[in-house]
């Protein structure tokens, strides 16, 4: 008897992984950019830390709330589509069966086999078959607002804490280059980690976040230096 095996895929991670990577990336990038910008204006270490902590709290709450609202809207749409599909199955079962068969036929099955597959899946779980093959809604990919909000808010906080810790231990005279350099290292590490978790090319992911991080911090440092000189 052949051994059964469970294949390991990464699609079940998409919901929380996207929110977690976005949260951590934004936490590192926005906080380090804020710190570099304030430091470039020749502010004191205390002022820099206050600005960074305020940015951490505000950013974490904004990320969590934004993810919750966004993913909740997606979940509402999915529920509405499922309710509509349920009504259609109750009102026109034969028409829905033909619609499902036509989907499988368009995917390459011959008409007889497409009809047979549609009949068997309908008998097993009609709503599940239409949700998956007509609407594109699956258990692994369905919206989970609370999960996304918690993942995004928590990882933002962790990401934002990293450059703040650097500010605490760095000499004030060279604070800007140290925060700049270490934050790029943090971003590169995050890119490598997210690439590994998602099965994507690690170096490409690391380069992507590092490039945009350097650009963002460079621009905010320039603004801080300019306004620090003017004010």
Image (cartoon, grey):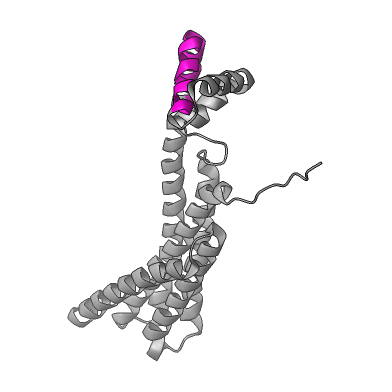
Picture coordinates of residue 227, whole percent (x, y): 21, 76
Q: Nearer the viewer, residue 38 or 112?
A: 112
Image quarter of the N terminus: top right
In the rendered structure, which segment of residues is drawn in magenta? 82-105
| Image quarter of the C terminus | bottom left
Is residue 55 part of the magenta span, yes or no? no
Residue at image position (42%, 80%) is 179
- The furthest residue to the top: 91
Furthest residue toward right: 1
Looking at the image, residue 134 lies above or below residue 187? above
Pick the residue in front: 127 or 173.
Answer: 127
Residue 89 is one of the magenta-drawn residues: yes
**Is 197 above or below relative to 142?**
below
In the foreground, 89 or 75: 89
Residue 93 seen in render: yes
Percent coordinates x, y for residue 196 in the rendering: 55, 64
The residue shown at (38%, 90%) is: 173
Decide if residue 182 is on the left or right side of residue 197: left
Asked if residue 34 can be seen in this view, the reply is no
Left or right side of 225 for 207? right
> Going by the image, does 125 lie left or right of 75?
right
In percent of width and height, residue 157 lies at 50, 62
Residue at position x 61%, y 20% in the image? 120
């Amino acid at each position: 008897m052949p051994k059964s095996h469970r294949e390991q895929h990464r699609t079940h991670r998409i919901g929380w992984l996207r929110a977690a990577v976005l949260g951590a990336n934004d936490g590192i990038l926005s906080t380090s950019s804020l710190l570099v910008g304030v430091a470039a204006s020749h502010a004191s270490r205390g002022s820099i830390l206050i600005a960074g902590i305020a940015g951490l709290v505000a950013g974490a709450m904004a990320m969590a709330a934004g993810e919750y609202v966004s993913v909740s809207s997606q979940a509402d749409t999915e529920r509405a589509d499922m309710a509509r599909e349920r009504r259609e199955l109750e009102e026109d079962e034969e028409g829905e069966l033909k619609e499902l068969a036509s989907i499988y036929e368009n995917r390459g099955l011959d008409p007889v086999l497409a009809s047979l597959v549609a009949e068997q899946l309908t008998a097993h779980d009609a709503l599940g078959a239409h949700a998956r093959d007509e609407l594109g809604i699956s258990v692994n990919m369905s919206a989970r607002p609370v999960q996304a909000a918690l993942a995004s808010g928590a990882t933002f906080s962790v990401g934002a804490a990293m450059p703040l810790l650097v500010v605490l231990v760095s000499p004030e005279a060279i604070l800007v280059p140290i925060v700049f350099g270490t934050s790029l290292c943090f971003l590169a590490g995050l890119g490598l980690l997210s690439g590994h978790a998602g099965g994507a090319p690690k170096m490409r992911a690391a380069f992507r976040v590092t490039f945009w991080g350097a650009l963002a911090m460079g621009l905010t440092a320039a603004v801080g230096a300019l306004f620090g000189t003017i004010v």
